[in-house]
Image (cartoon, rainbow, N blue to C red):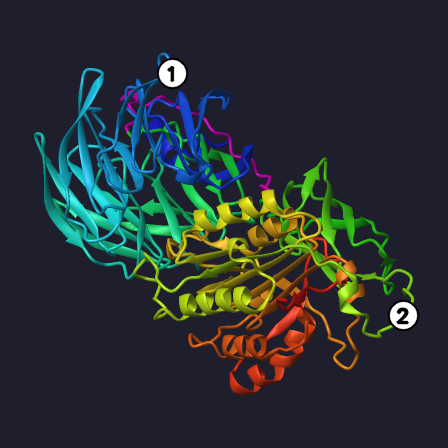
C-alpha cells in the first residue's frame, strides 16, 4: 500500500480533464412545418420556438407548453428572444411579416407591437442588461429599441448593410452589437451610452451570412454562412480579427452557438448535421460527436445551465439533446478552500482493464416482407409497410429506409413505401448512439394485376361523346425579385401569353376559363390552385402550363419551380413537385395535363413508353381519368430560349384534327425537339395523383 497526498485543486483539474462532451436525445417536439428558430431564456425557466406556418410556442423548463400563437401562415416563421430578467419575450412576424411583438410573460399578454421595418424581420435580440433590443430585416436595416419600464421605443435605425440583415447579436458584456448580412459582411458596432457606432466591417465570407454569436466572455465571435464555413474572430482590445476558418460542413451553415461555459461551439447545417467544437485556448478542435438527422438543420441553441442543446429541423421536428461535459454560465469560476485536505488513495497491484470502445454496429432483422437470401418477394400492392427489428447494446440513434427516417419504438421499426412496377431495391440502415452503422439491402418485385382485354383501337366517331369544360392555368416567370436569380429576358412570359392565345383562339378554351399569371408570387400560384379546386368538376379538363426557372434538390431527389418572389437558397419559397402533385391530386378533373418548360421538370414522373404506331381511340381514352405531364427535359438543365416551346406551339397552330390526344401531341414534337436541342422531352403519368390510363384530348373550336 502506498499513500499519495494531492491538493483538492489538482484533483478538480484532473476531474475536469476527464469530462467528455456527450449528447443523448431527451425529447422530440413535432410540427407540420419546419422549425425555424428556438431559444432558451437566460435563467433557464423558458424555452420558445417558431414554426414556418407562423406558429410561436412557449414552454416551461420541463418542456410543457405554456402559450401558443398561430398567425397568418403566409408570413412564415419569425424569431424569438427573451429579456434577461425573463419578464418579456420578443418575436417577429406577429400580425404581418415586418412587425415585432412583445409578450409579457407574467400574464401572457401582448403589450406592444412595432411595424418600423418595411420588409421581413429575420432576427431579434435583447441586450444583456435588458435595456435594449435589436432587430435585423430584409429592408437592409437594424432597428434599436430602448426599454422604459414596460414600454419600448425606437431609438435608432442603422443602415450600414447593403443587403438583407439576417442575424443580430449583443455581446454578453453589453459593449458590442454584431450583425450578419447577405452582403457577405459581419459588422461590429460599439455601444456608447444610447449610441451604436460602426466599429468594424469584416469581409471574410464569400456568401450570405445566416448567423452570428458571441462567446460568453465576449472575447470571440462566430459566424455561419452559405459558403459552408464557420469563421471565428478574436477580440484584441476593440478590434476583432479572423482567428480560424472551419470548413467541416458540406452545405449552408444556418446557425452557430457557444455553450454557456464558453468551452464548446455548435454549428447547424443543411448537410443535416450538428457539429461540436471544443475550445482549447485560441484553438477550436472538432469533436467526434456529430449529431445526425435526416433533415436540414435550421437552428441550434444551448440552455444556460449547459444541460441541453436544442436543434430545429426542416422536417418539422425540434430535438432536445441532454448533454454531459458542458458547464453553466455561472460556473466559470470555481472557488475552493485554500487549505488542501489529505486524500488517501490505495494503489492495487491488479491492473485496470482498458476501456472497451463499442465498435459493433446494430443488428437488423427484416420481418415483413419475408426476405430470404437469394429470393425476391413478389407483391401486387402499390404500397407496403417494411417492418423489422434492430438490436444494439448502446441504443439506436436512427433507422433509415432509402434515406428516409422510419418509425422506431421498442427497437421495432416500420416504414410505409410505394412500389413501382418491376424490381424495387431498398436499403435499411441502422445507426447506434456510438455512430456505428449497419445496412441491409433487398429487392421487392411488384407484379402487375391481370392483363386487361385489348382495346379495339379503331377511331370512333368523335361527335358521340361529351368532353366537359376546358380550363387552363398558364404561368410564365421571366423576372425575379431576388437579384441572385437571373432574369430570363421575358422569354417565359412571351411563351405563356402565346400559349394562352392559341388555346383560346383555336381550341375549346373559353377566355373566362383561362388564367394567365405573368411573374406571379408563390402565394398567387397556390391561390389559383385553390380556386380551380372549387370550380372544376369531375367532367372537366385542365391544362397547367409553366415556363420559368426550375431546379432539382439532389438530397431529396425532388424538382421544383422558382416563382417570381423566391429567395435564392431558401427552399420554403419554391414550389416543389410534391406541392404541385398534391394540388393536382386535390382538383377533381377528368383530365389534367401538365406542360412544364423548365430545368429538371422531368423529375415529376416516371417515364412511360408510348405506343406511337397505334391509332388513338379517343372515346376510350377520354373515358378514363388521366394525370399526365409533358416536359421539356428530364433531370437536367434546359436552354433559356425554348426549342421545346417552339415546336409545341407550331404543332398546336398547324393541327387540323378535331380531336388530338396529349400522347399524339408529344409524338409530334419529341423528335424535332430532341434533334434541335441538347434535351429530350418527356411524357408520362404523374405519380400517385389518380391517373387511370386515360389521355387529355385537345378539341378544336366549332
Is residue 341 located in the magenta-colored stretch of the structure? yes
Placement of 655 over or under 326, stated as above or below? below
- Where is residue 541, by image quadrant? bottom right
* Badge number at residue 454: 2
Q: Name the main secondary structure of what is drawn in magenta.
A: loop
Residue 225 image position (x, y, % from top left): 33, 54
Q: Residue furthest top?
A: 107
User: What's the distance in space between the residues labelled 2 and 1, CA to CA?
Assistant: 69 Å
Structural crowding at the residue carrying mark 1, measured as other residues with C-alpha within 10 Å and reported as few (<14), some (14–19) or many (≥20): some
Placement of 407 over or under 331, stated as above or below? below
Q: Which residue range is magenta in the image?
A: 333-353
Name the element at disc 2. Answer: loop
**Callout 2–callout 1 Cβ contact below 8 Å:** no
Tell me which residue sits at (35%, 41%) in the image: 257
| Residue on which disc 1 sits | 108
| Camera sees residue 283 | yes
Amino acid at each position: 500500500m502506498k499513500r499519495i497526498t494531492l491538493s483538492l485543486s489538482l484533483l478538480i483539474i484532473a476531474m475536469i480533464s476527464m469530462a467528455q462532451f456527450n449528447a443523448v436525445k431527451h425529447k422530440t417536439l413535432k410540427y407540420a412545418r419546419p422549425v425555424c428558430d428556438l431559444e432558451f431564456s437566460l435563467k433557464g425557466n423558458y424555452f420558445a420556438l417558431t414554426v414556418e406556418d407562423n406558429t410561436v410556442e412557449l414552454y416551461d423548463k420541463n418542456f410543457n407548453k405554456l402559450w401558443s400563437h398561430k398567425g397568418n401562415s403566409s408570413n412564415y416563421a419569425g424569431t424569438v428572444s427573451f429579456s434577461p430578467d425573463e419578464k418579456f419575450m420578443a418575436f417577429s412576424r406577429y400580425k404581418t411579416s415586418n412587425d415585432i411583438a412583445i409578450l409579457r410573460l407574467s400574464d401572457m399578454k401582448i403589450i406592444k407591437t412595432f411595424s418600423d421595418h418595411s420588409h421581413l424581420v429575420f432576427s431579434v435580440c435583447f441586450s444583456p442588461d435588458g435595456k435594449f433590443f435589436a432587430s435585423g430585416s430584409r429592408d437592409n436595416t437594424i432597428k434599436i429599441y430602448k426599454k422604459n419600464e414596460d414600454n419600448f421605443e425606437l431609438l435608432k435605425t442603422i443602415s450600414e448593410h447593403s443587403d438583407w440583415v439576417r442575424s443580430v447579436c449583443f455581446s454578453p458584456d453589453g459593449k458590442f452589437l454584431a450583425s450578419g448580412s447577405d452582403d457577405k459582411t459581419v459588422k461590429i458596432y460599439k455601444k456608447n451610452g444610447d449610441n451604436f457606432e460602426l466599429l468594424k466591417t469584416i469581409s471574410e465570407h464569400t456568401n450570405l451570412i445566416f448567423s452570428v454569436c458571441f462567446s460568453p466572455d465576449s472575447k470571440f465571435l462566430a459566424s455561419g454562412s452559405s459558403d459552408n464555413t464557420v469563421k471565428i474572430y478574436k477580440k484584441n482590445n476593440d478590434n476583432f480579427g479572423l482567428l480560424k476558418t472551419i470548413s467541416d460542413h458540406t452545405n449552408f451553415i444556418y446557425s452557430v452557438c457557444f455553450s454557456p461555459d464558453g468551452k464548446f461551439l455548435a454549428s447547424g447545417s443543411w448537410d443535416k448535421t450538428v457539429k461540436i467544437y471544443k475550445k482549447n485556448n485560441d484553438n477550436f478542435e472538432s469533436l467526434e460527436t456529430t449529431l445526425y438527422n435526416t433533415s436540414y438543420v435550421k437552428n441550434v441553441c444551448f440552455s444556460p445551465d449547459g444541460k441541453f442543446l436544442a436543434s430545429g429541423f426542416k422536417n418539422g421536428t425540434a430535438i432536445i439533446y441532454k448533454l454531459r461535459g458542458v458547464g453553466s454560465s455561472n460556473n466559470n469560476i470555481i472557488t475552493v478552500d485554500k487549505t488542501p485536505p489529505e486524500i488517501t488513495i490505495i494503489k492495487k497491484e491488479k491492473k485496470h482493464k482498458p476501456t472497451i470502445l463499442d465498435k459493433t454496429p446494430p443488428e437488423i432483422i427484416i420481418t415483413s416482407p419475408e426476405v430470404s437470401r437469394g429470393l425476391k418477394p413478389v407483391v401486387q400492392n402499390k404500397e407496403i409497410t417494411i417492418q423489422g427489428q434492430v438490436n444494439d447494446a448502446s441504443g439506436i440513434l436512427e433507422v433509415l429506409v432509402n434515406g428516409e427516417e422510419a418509425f422506431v419504438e421498442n427497437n421495432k421499426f416500420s416504414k410505409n413505401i410505394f412500389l413501382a412496377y418491376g424490381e424495387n431495391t431498398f436499403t435499411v440502415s441502422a445507426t447506434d448512439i456510438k455512430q456505428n452503422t449497419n445496412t441491409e439491402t433487398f429487392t421487392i418485385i411488384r407484379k402487375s394485376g391481370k392483363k386487361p382485354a385489348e382495346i379495339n383501337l379503331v377511331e370512333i366517331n368523335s361527335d358521340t361523346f361529351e368532353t366537359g369544360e376546358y380550363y387552363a392555368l398558364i404561368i410564365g416567370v421571366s423576372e425575379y425579385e431576388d437579384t441572385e436569380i437571373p432574369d430570363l429576358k421575358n422569354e417565359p412570359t412571351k411563351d405563356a401569353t402565346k400559349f394562352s392565345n392559341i388555346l383560346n383562339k383555336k381550341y375549346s378554351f373559353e377566355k373566362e376559363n383561362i388564367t394567365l399569371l405573368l411573374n406571379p408570387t408563390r402565394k398567387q400560384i397556390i391561390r389559383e390552385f385553390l380556386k380551380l379546386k372549387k370550380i372544376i368538376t369531375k367532367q372537366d379538363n385542365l391544362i397547367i402550363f409553366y415556363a420559368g426557372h426550375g431546379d432539382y434538390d439532389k438530397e431529396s431527389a425532388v424538382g421544383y419551380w422558382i416563382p417570381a418572389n423566391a429567395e435564392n437558397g431558401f427552399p420554403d419559397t419554391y414550389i416543389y413537385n410534391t406541392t404541385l402533385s398534391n394540388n393536382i391530386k386535390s382538383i377533381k378533373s377528368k383530365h389534367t395535363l401538365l406542360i412544364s418548360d423548365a430545368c429538371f421538370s422531368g423529375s415529376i414522373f416516371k417515364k412511360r413508353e408510348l405506343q406511337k404506331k397505334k391509332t388513338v381511340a379517343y372515346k376510350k381514352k377520354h373515358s378514363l381519368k388521366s394525370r399526365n405531364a409533358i416536359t421539356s427535359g428530364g433531370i437536367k438543365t434546359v436552354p433559356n430560349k425554348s426549342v421545346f416551346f417552339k415546336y409545341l406551339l407550331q404543332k398546336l397552330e398547324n393541327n387540323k384534327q378535331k380531336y388530338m390526344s396529349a400522347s399524339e401531341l408529344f409524338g409530334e414534337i419529341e423528335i424535332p425537339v430532341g434533334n434541335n436541342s441538347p434535351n429530350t422531352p418527356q411524357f408520362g403519368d404523374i405519380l400517385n395523383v389518380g391517373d387511370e390510363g386515360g389521355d387529355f384530348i385537345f378539341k378544336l373550336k366549332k
